[in-house]
Image: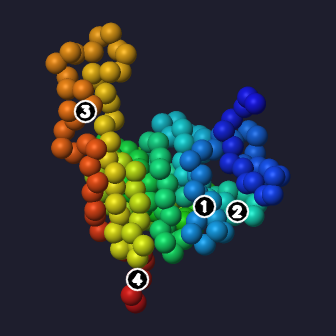
């Protein structure tokens, strides 16, 4: 069928759509506790920000935005305690893996000032602006360690000049199989700590 991508739940042969027909949603990930689903959506696009990360109850209801910054998010993954989400994104020229709270909201527009580490766009930690922490500058697919203390990041080549079908490619560019040491690697980094962890 034609139309936008949608998130659906299958129960004993029946299908329940969790996202409306007018909202494209993709890369859905169920939280470890089975209560929430995180996904990327083009709902409420803004100039320079075509998609954001959203969370909704797996049992239904309306979604809530948990990121609100210029750039596209991808590969959302839940922390083992279902409270945080790691995802890949580019922010003001800094690509990498970021972490945000699953309970963040983005009810009002964010400012356009440059982001600061640990702050939303504009550097202010306003209640309406989701806070994103840069966990690593390695852009790739993240995964949490079982204890939530580390992130594994599988990096990959973001371009393939040798085999991309571009007739204007430079034949001196190395093909993907000869990519640099920072590509096709598995990185282990410490995960940002949850607020008041160990208090």
Mark 4 vs mark 2, CA separation in Å: 26 Å
The image shows residue 112, relative to residue 76, as above or below, that is above
As helix, strand or loop, the secondary structure at mark 2 comes to loop
Q: Are marks 2 and 1 in contact (CB under 8 Å)?
A: yes
Residue situated in front as seen by the camera: 101 or 156: 156
Tell me where residue 85 appears, x and y as whole percent: 48, 62
As helix, strand or loop, the secondary structure at mark 4 comes to loop
- Tag shown at residue 30: 1
Mark 4 vs mark 3, CA separation in Å: 42 Å
Q: Are marks 4 and 3 in contact (CB under 8 Å)?
A: no
Tell me where residue 33 appears, x and y as whole percent: 61, 72
Residue on which the image places disc 3: 177
- The label nearer to you, 1 versus 4, is 1
Residue at the (66%, 60%) spot, across then down = 56
- Tag shown at residue 58: 2
As helix, strand or loop, the secondary structure at mark 3 comes to helix
- The label nearer to you, 2 versus 3, is 3
Return the residue found at the far top.
Answer: 167
The image shows residue 174, relative to residue 65, as above or below, that is above
Query: Which of marks 1 and 3 precedes in the sequence?
Result: 1
Query: Would you say 80 lies left or right of 169 here?
Result: right
- Tag shown at residue 197: 4
The image shows residue 50, relative to residue 107, as above or below, that is above
């Amino acid at each position: 069928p034609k139309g936008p991508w949608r998130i659906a739940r299958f129960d004993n042969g029946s299908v329940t759509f969790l996202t409306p027909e007018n909202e494209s949603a993709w890369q859905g990930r169920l939280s470890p506790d089975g209560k929430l689903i995180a996904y990327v959506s083009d709902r409420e696009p803004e100039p320079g920000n075509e998609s954001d990360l959203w969370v909704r109850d797996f049992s239904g209801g309306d979604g809530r935005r948990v990121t609100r910054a210029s750039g596209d998010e991808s590969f959302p993954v839940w922390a083992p305690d279902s409270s945080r989400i790691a995802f890949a994104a580019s922010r003001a020229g800094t690509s990498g893996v970021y972490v945000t709270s699953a309970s963040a909201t983005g009810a009002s527009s964010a400012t356009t000032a440059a982001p600061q580490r640990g702050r939303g766009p504009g550097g202010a930690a306003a209640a309406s602006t989701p806070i994103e922490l840069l966990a690593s500058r390695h852009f790739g697919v993240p995964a949490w360690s079982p204890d939530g203390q580390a992130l594994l990041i599988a990096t990959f080549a973001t371009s393939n000049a040798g085999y991309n079908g571009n007739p204007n490619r430079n034949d001196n560019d190395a093909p993907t199989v000869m990519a640099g040491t920072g590509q096709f690697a598995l990185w282990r980094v410490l995960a940002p700590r949850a607020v008041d962890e160990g208090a």
